Amino acid sequence: MPDLGDLLGPGFDEVLAELVVISVDSDRTGSLPRRAFAALRSAGFGRMRLPVDDGGLGASVPQLLDAIRRLAAADSGIAQSWRTHVIATERHLASAASPTRTRWLRRIADGAILGGGWSEADGSGAARFTTRLERFDGRLTLSGRKFYSTGSAYADWLEYSAVGEDGRDVVVAVPATAPGITILDDWDGFGQRATASGTTILDTVPVDEGDLVPFSDFGPGTGGWQQATLLAVLAGIAEGARQRAAALVGDSERRGVATGLHALETFGRISALAAVHAATGGRFAWNAVTTWDVEAVRNFGIAELPEREERYARAEEFVRAVLDLWAAGDEGVHRGGRFVRVDGALAGADRVPGRPAVLQAGGSAPGQRLAGLVADAVFSIEHDPAEAQLHRRQVAEQAVLAGRGADAVRIYPGLAIVIGSTEREAWERFEHWEHQAPPTYSLNELSKALGADLGDADLDAPVPAAVVDAAEQEGKGWSTGYRRVLVRRIRTERPTIRALLRDFGGYGQRFVAGTPEAIADSMEAWFRAGAADGFNVMLDLFPSGLVDFVDQVVPELQRRGLFRTEYADGTLLDRFRSP
């Protein structure tokens, strides 16, 4: 199998080297690295996965993902900008032989890049897209507005979700040069300007009916590619951080930082925290997670998942090392430990006053102890307010035992919500988008949560008693806190598996579908009962779900005196600590 150098040629490495230099300026100035993108196109990056006989480079899936990873190590934004093109290419490759497939593979082989957008900043009404196909003067046209149009500024063809003439959802592709398309370079969120993820305005754009497919035909061939592409980008970000950390460690004598792999691992991660804290002006929190996921653990060079007690011991040492380094400033820290050894000072920790807020999410006894020791806030998963009150008291007791105040740790229960003008509309919206997911997704997640395969279970019957009994005794695998809450609910309410799936939805969080007033009622009841200091809100869609929450639920909470009407200066940690 040829390596990437043979596939893409020496120009690929030259582009990577250029991106390392210009990526910072791209984010600062907002200028898109079009020359670098054009060089990637010329090298064949966009047609890597096409078979050689179809005009491609014949790359394997691992080769493509490795190329994305290497690109992300140089500039994560431009790597992310290829996501829509990658997913569309894989969809066409996986489709059955047809004139449509042949036409699209030829376009891609000729160098065409695909972009587009799905999200709608103005909301999606009763679970429907507002972008629509309509006829003007006998010709089919597309009108609407899309947000998060990743990669569109570089693209030759653009794909959009819309509502067709018959009221059904469709996917339509149009040339990027078609009249009526305006692509705004107004992306200013989360950095990564090079993703070109701005707004697209569609004003009666002419549509060729040959480039129109039903939404229901759109899914095959795309499963997992969104996540795979994102994981490749994240792996590249980590690799880029490692490379930059190595450069910092190589200059260690000036800072007194110990060299070697262990220092690289520790200071690389901690330096990344310091960089984000400085870049955001302190509006940053660090979620100190001890995972039960074997694959996640292997990403940190650990072959096997440690026992829960060891995971929390590792976490405690690492978090204490971070906090000690932050507090020590230029004097540095010299400490040994079972898992983390630190000998040096953290450069740049004083650029922004204070330190990042530390979040934690473990609901087990070791998790509560860690929260009491180091956390500023905890993400909890209780479904019952009485249980949430108990969890809050237990964390407060651990904080006191650690020499901190009883109110040192804020508790933010998870709350998954779907908003509608009526409860029925909210559930219709939920059902619409739930049906877009693979049919077994939620069932698979519930199976993992309970540690048993429910694929053959009767969905209209309760969870089998043997499964519940085994889950209660299970000590490994899924989150202890999630499993405890889930088992308690099953034993208390005896829901059918179907009802459990509808509420559980793969999240495991408390779930509310209803009007803004009903959602505010639920939040207020928990807050006034002392079951929550705030909420870890999980929305069904982005950005429309966030827009709906800000425009509809927040004003209702403000009217009740439960939500601030303006923000004072200060860091995120300051806000956690304020009354």
Image (cartoon, rainbow, N blue to C red):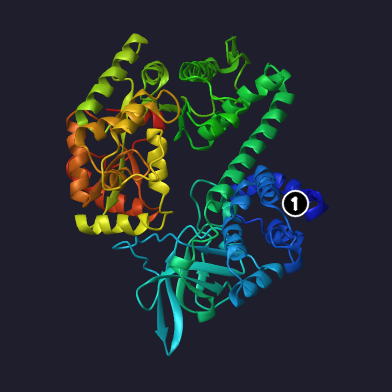
The quadrant the C terminus occupies is top left
In the figure, is residue 371 to the left or right of 340? left
Does residue 406 show up?
no
Dot 1 falls on a residue whose secondary structure is helix
Q: Quadrant of residue 87?
A: bottom right
Q: Which residue is mark 1?
A: 15
Q: Which sits in the foreground, 177 or 396? A: 396
The answer to whether one can see residue 55 in this image is: yes
Report crowding for label 1: few under 14, some 14 to 19, many 20 or more residues within 10 A (C-alpha): some
Report how many numbered discs are placed on residues in the image. Answer: 1
As drawn, is 169 to the left or to the right of 80? left
Residue depicted at 27% across the width and 39% down the height: 564
* 508 lies above or below 97: above
Up-down relation of residue 465 to residue 540 (above or below): above
Q: Position of residue 89 (x, y in %)?
A: 61, 62
Residue 70: % across, % down: 69, 45
Mark 1 belongs to which amino acid? Answer: Val
| Residue at screen point 25% across, 34% down | 489
> Residue 174: horizontal and vertical position, in percent?
54, 74
Please indicate whether residue 163 sits to the left or right of residue 353 in the image. left
The one of 13 and 87 positioned closer to us in this rendering:
87
Q: Is residue 35 above or below residue 4?
A: below
User: Which residue reaches farthest bottom?
Assistant: 137
Does 284 appear above or below 121? above
Question: Quarter-wise, where is residue 577 in the image?
Answer: top left
Q: Where in the figure is residue 264, as x and y percent of width and height?
A: 67, 24
Q: Which quadrant holds residue 511?
A: top left
